[in-house]
Amino acid sequence: MSVYSPDQLERYFSFISLDNWKTLLGSNVRGFFDELIKCQLARITYNTLSLHYSMDKSGSLDMDMLFDKMVVRDRGGYCFELNVFFLQMVRSLGFEAMAVGCRMRDQKSTSAGLDRWRTTSHMAIVVFINGERFLIDIGCGVQSPVTPLLLWSGQTATGLTGQELKVEFKKLAPMAMGKPVWIYSMRFGGEDGLWKEMYAFADTEYLASDFDVLNYYTLHASPFTRLVVVQSFFFSRICDGASGTVSLVNDRVTQHIRGGEEEVAALQSERERVEAFEKHFGIQLSEEEMHAMKESAYALPAGTSLLT
């Protein structure tokens, strides 16, 4: 099985500012993964930019091309890119891990039946740590769990400020004929908050060829072909020490803390959006990348001297 080289590992950990990773790994494996996930989420953005700001609109799951995109070119990626990359990193560190395919919950549906679940269109990772299995997912945007989740039904974990996370082993719906699956949920507001189911997955390992098919759907037919999205996490604020997320979706930049949403900016032009990529996420597009958006139906008005 191909793995990342020691030099690539060192470059990755330096890139995400986890320079003491060997000490952490040698002293507390669970704590190491908690720090690793947070550093990854804070440094490498979840985004759909390659589906819009590139001439070929392609997305490869080749391990070396992913390393180049994530670490060398600092471009982040969408769910399959991020989780395939992270799975390869985990295996390169010597851990046993498998990929699973996930059904996303339709957040607009109020049904209690099977129709509330969408087709399999997401990927997550199950990692074996000290003989126990944990869910890890750094590719679900602002819905990503920020810590490893023990696959022990109903046990909760602390996420972002004011957030709780859990996985439960149960059927997709009360009347479902299939076997139970793992369902990942989150909530804000403590015991008064409502649990929000995010996705479900079975104890079935998915192979690289499975994700090649799902990745093709993402690139050519998924909602992300119509959405410009960039999302990132922060884990400290000078004013109150809170953790939260920052999102750009089409023409709005918002900040989320404790389950609340605050608008940061309303973008009026393509120029403002490109400037927002750099200001809020540290992504500076090339002239070629900006030009690729020029004729797109999802481009904002150009703005002065941009895309002309």
Image (tube, rainbow, N blue to C red):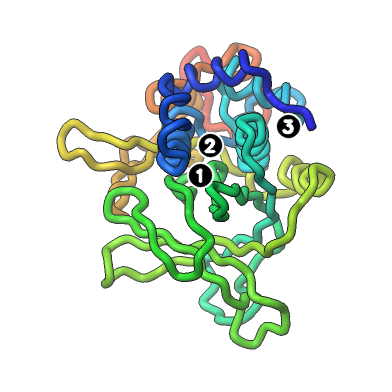
Query: Which amino acid type is marked by label 1?
Result: Gly
Earlier in the chain: of badge 3 and badge 2, it is 2
Q: Are marks 1 and 2 in contact (CB under 8 Å)?
A: yes
**Which percent across, then down, holds residue 175?**
64, 87
Mark sitting on residue 46: 2
* Marks 3/2: CA–CA distance: 14 Å
Q: Quadrant of the N terminus?
A: top right
Judge the density around disc 3: few (<14), some (14-19), many (≥20) Cα neighbours within 10 Å. some
Q: Residue at x 56, y 35 (%)?
A: 47
Residue 272 shows in the view: no
Query: Which amino acid type is marked by label 3?
Result: Gly
* Marks 3/1: CA–CA distance: 17 Å
Query: Which amino acid type is marked by label 2?
Result: Tyr
Instruction: Name which quarter of the figure residue 146 lies in.
Output: top left
**Which percent across, then down, holds residue 75?**
57, 24
Foreground residue among 112 and 301: 112
Judge the density around disc 1: few (<14), some (14-19), many (≥20) Cα neighbours within 10 Å. many
Judge the density around disc 2: few (<14), some (14-19), many (≥20) Cα neighbours within 10 Å. many
Q: Secondary structure at mark 3?
A: loop
Q: Secondary structure at mark 1?
A: helix
Pointer 1 residue? 141
Mark sitting on residue 59: 3
